[in-house]
Image (cartoon, rainbow, N blue to C red):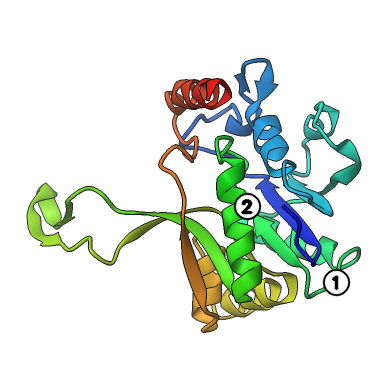
Amino acid sequence: MKIQTKLWAVVPAAGSGSRFSKSELKQYQYIAQRTVIEHTVNRLNTLQLAGCVIAIGESDNFAQTLAFEHLDRLHFCKGGAERVHSVLNALMYLLNIADENDWVLVHDAARPCVTTDCLEKLIITAVESDQSSILAIPVRDTLKQVVEDHQIEKTVSRDLLWQAQTPQVAKISILKNAIETALKDQIVITDEASALEYVNEPVQVVQGRSDNIKITYPDDLELARLILQSQAIN
């Protein structure tokens, strides 16, 4: 895949992942002799990236020792207290080496199973439409709105609902300004799209795949291992 603009990646990897473990970082768990973050970054590097900025914790001395592919493309910066602060720090780092109108894709460190096809579809859609875009999948299951004592209040229509994934892609300056504005106004930012939505920046969904899982709990590691094994076979 060739596009006429530079493409950068940001991987926020400074989080504690408290739902996974109180002491172990999920991005540094091993699947088939590689850490989760190695799998993730190597998937991103199947694209022709100009570079990839990994935002890591202040006391993280491990990330830079890993055997990532395309080491010449990698940059490291200090992460922040929350995911959004890590992303902002990485965007500020990028502006020292990239043009503000270059595209940047932000991807969770704990999503190692995203496919190259999905990555390419996302980038082509964003660039050709000149619009911020995210990977997402339509909600499949029946959704219930629940009130106190776990009582169902009503069934929520899923017709217009999509489950957001990453990567999420935008132009560097647009995303940086959106995050800064939302933070200044004390808006809760759950992903890049939520910041873009707040400043009325159009964002479109690009249908991804259900196997683009985010490792959240310990048993997700085994599922990710099986997915990666299946993808390698296919």
**For the residue marked with disc 1, what is the amino acid?**
Asp
216 or 141: nearer the eye? 141
Image spot of residue 128 (x, y percent): 63, 71
Q: Residue, x 64% and y 56% (percent of image)?
A: 106
Residue 70 higher or lower than 138, as above or below: above
Check disc 1: other Cα within 10 Å, few if <14, some if 14-19, many if 20+: some
Q: Is residue 217 left or right of residue 192?
A: left
Image spot of residue 170 (x, y percent): 65, 68
Check disc 2: other Cα within 10 Å, few if <14, some if 14-19, many if 20+: some
Residue extending farthest to the top is 33
**For the residue marked with disc 2, what is the amino acid?**
Glu
The local secondary structure at tag 1 comes to loop
Mark 1 vs mark 2: give the one in front.
2
Q: Which residue is mark 1?
A: 99
The disc, 1 or 2, on the residue closer to the chain's N-terminal end is: 1
Q: Residue, x 23% and y 64% (percent of image)?
A: 159
67 or 88: nearer the eye? 67
Residue 14 higher or lower than 81, as above or below: above
Q: Which residue is mark 2?
A: 120
